[in-house]
Image (cartoon, grey):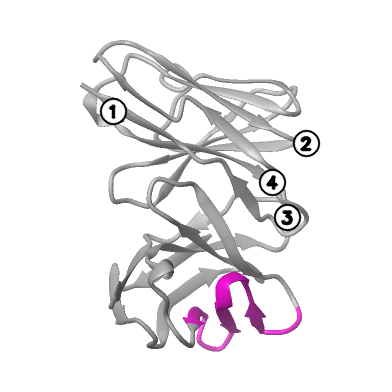
Amino acid sequence: AQSVTQLGSHVSVSEGALVLLRCNYSSSVPPYLFWYVQYPNQGLQLLLKYTTGATLVKGINGFEAEFKKSETSFHLTKPSAHMSDAAEYFCAVSSSRSASKIIFGSGTRLSIRP
Amino acid sequence: SAVISQKPSRDICQRGTSLTIQCQVDSQVTMMFWYRQQPGQSLTLIATANQGSEATYESGFVIDKFPISRPNLTFSTLTVSNMSPEDSSIYLCSVEGGGSNEQFFGPGTRLTVL
């Protein structure tokens, strides 16, 4: 069984500040991990993914995430927030052993203060 | 990545009626997925639709309420039957993106039931 926990349903940061969105996962097999972003009134867009190999994954729009197996975490960061980053962010997990569905976290709404 | 379109983009429906949502992909895919996103919530998988076979429904979703068609490798429909206000949600379709189980999402259909 797999699950995802996102800590903090709402995060607010100032423009130019560090963005940190937390995600912890549970998986009985090596996981595939994803971060998706949803802008208002739009579908989901893949930000980045971890499958195998390098544990620091870089995505679009300056975001990156680090897979830490010992901590079962996959936190999303961005060094400097822009106003355009305001959106809902979803962490998700899937199994690496077979074609399978994705399990989504509850989401974190990111607000950017001017 | 695949380009996915959905019709309608939004609709307002009366209680007791049914609505069929269409999902079109610009390339052939084996697996398509239908999700529900209730207001302020995360995504919940309704069913997985593979071409040439019956859709596989998740716990809590039944075919009589959410019949799905998958006539070919680029198209699928989801019908929300005998609607009630509790069915007011965003309905999203997605397609498999490759060997790492990632998915690409359509823009969603925003349904309001009065």
Q: CA distance from mark 4 to mark 2?
A: 11 Å
| Residue position marked by numbered label 3 in the rendering | A98
Residue A4 at x, y percent in the picture:
45, 66
Q: Based on the displayed image, in which of its 4 quarters is residue A62 positioned? A: bottom right
Task: Tell whether B41 sits left or right of B94.
Answer: left
Q: Which SS class for mark 4?
A: strand
Q: CA distance from mark 4 to mark 1?
A: 28 Å
The earlier-in-sequence mark between 1 and 2 is: 2
The earlier-in-sequence mark between 4 and 2 is: 2
| Residue position marked by numbered label 2 in the rendering | B27
Residue A63 lies in the magenta-colored region: yes
Q: Give the residues drawn in magenta, as a range.
A: A53-77
Q: Which chain is indicated by disc 4? A: B
Q: Which SS class for mark 3?
A: loop
Inspect the image, locate mark 1, and give the three-letter code of the amino acid beneath it: Thr
Residue B78 at x, y percent in the picture:
51, 23
Q: Which SS class for mark 2?
A: loop
| Residue position marked by numbered label 1 in the rendering | B112
Task: Tell whether A52 sits left or right of A65.
Answer: right
| Residue position marked by numbered label 4 in the rendering | B96
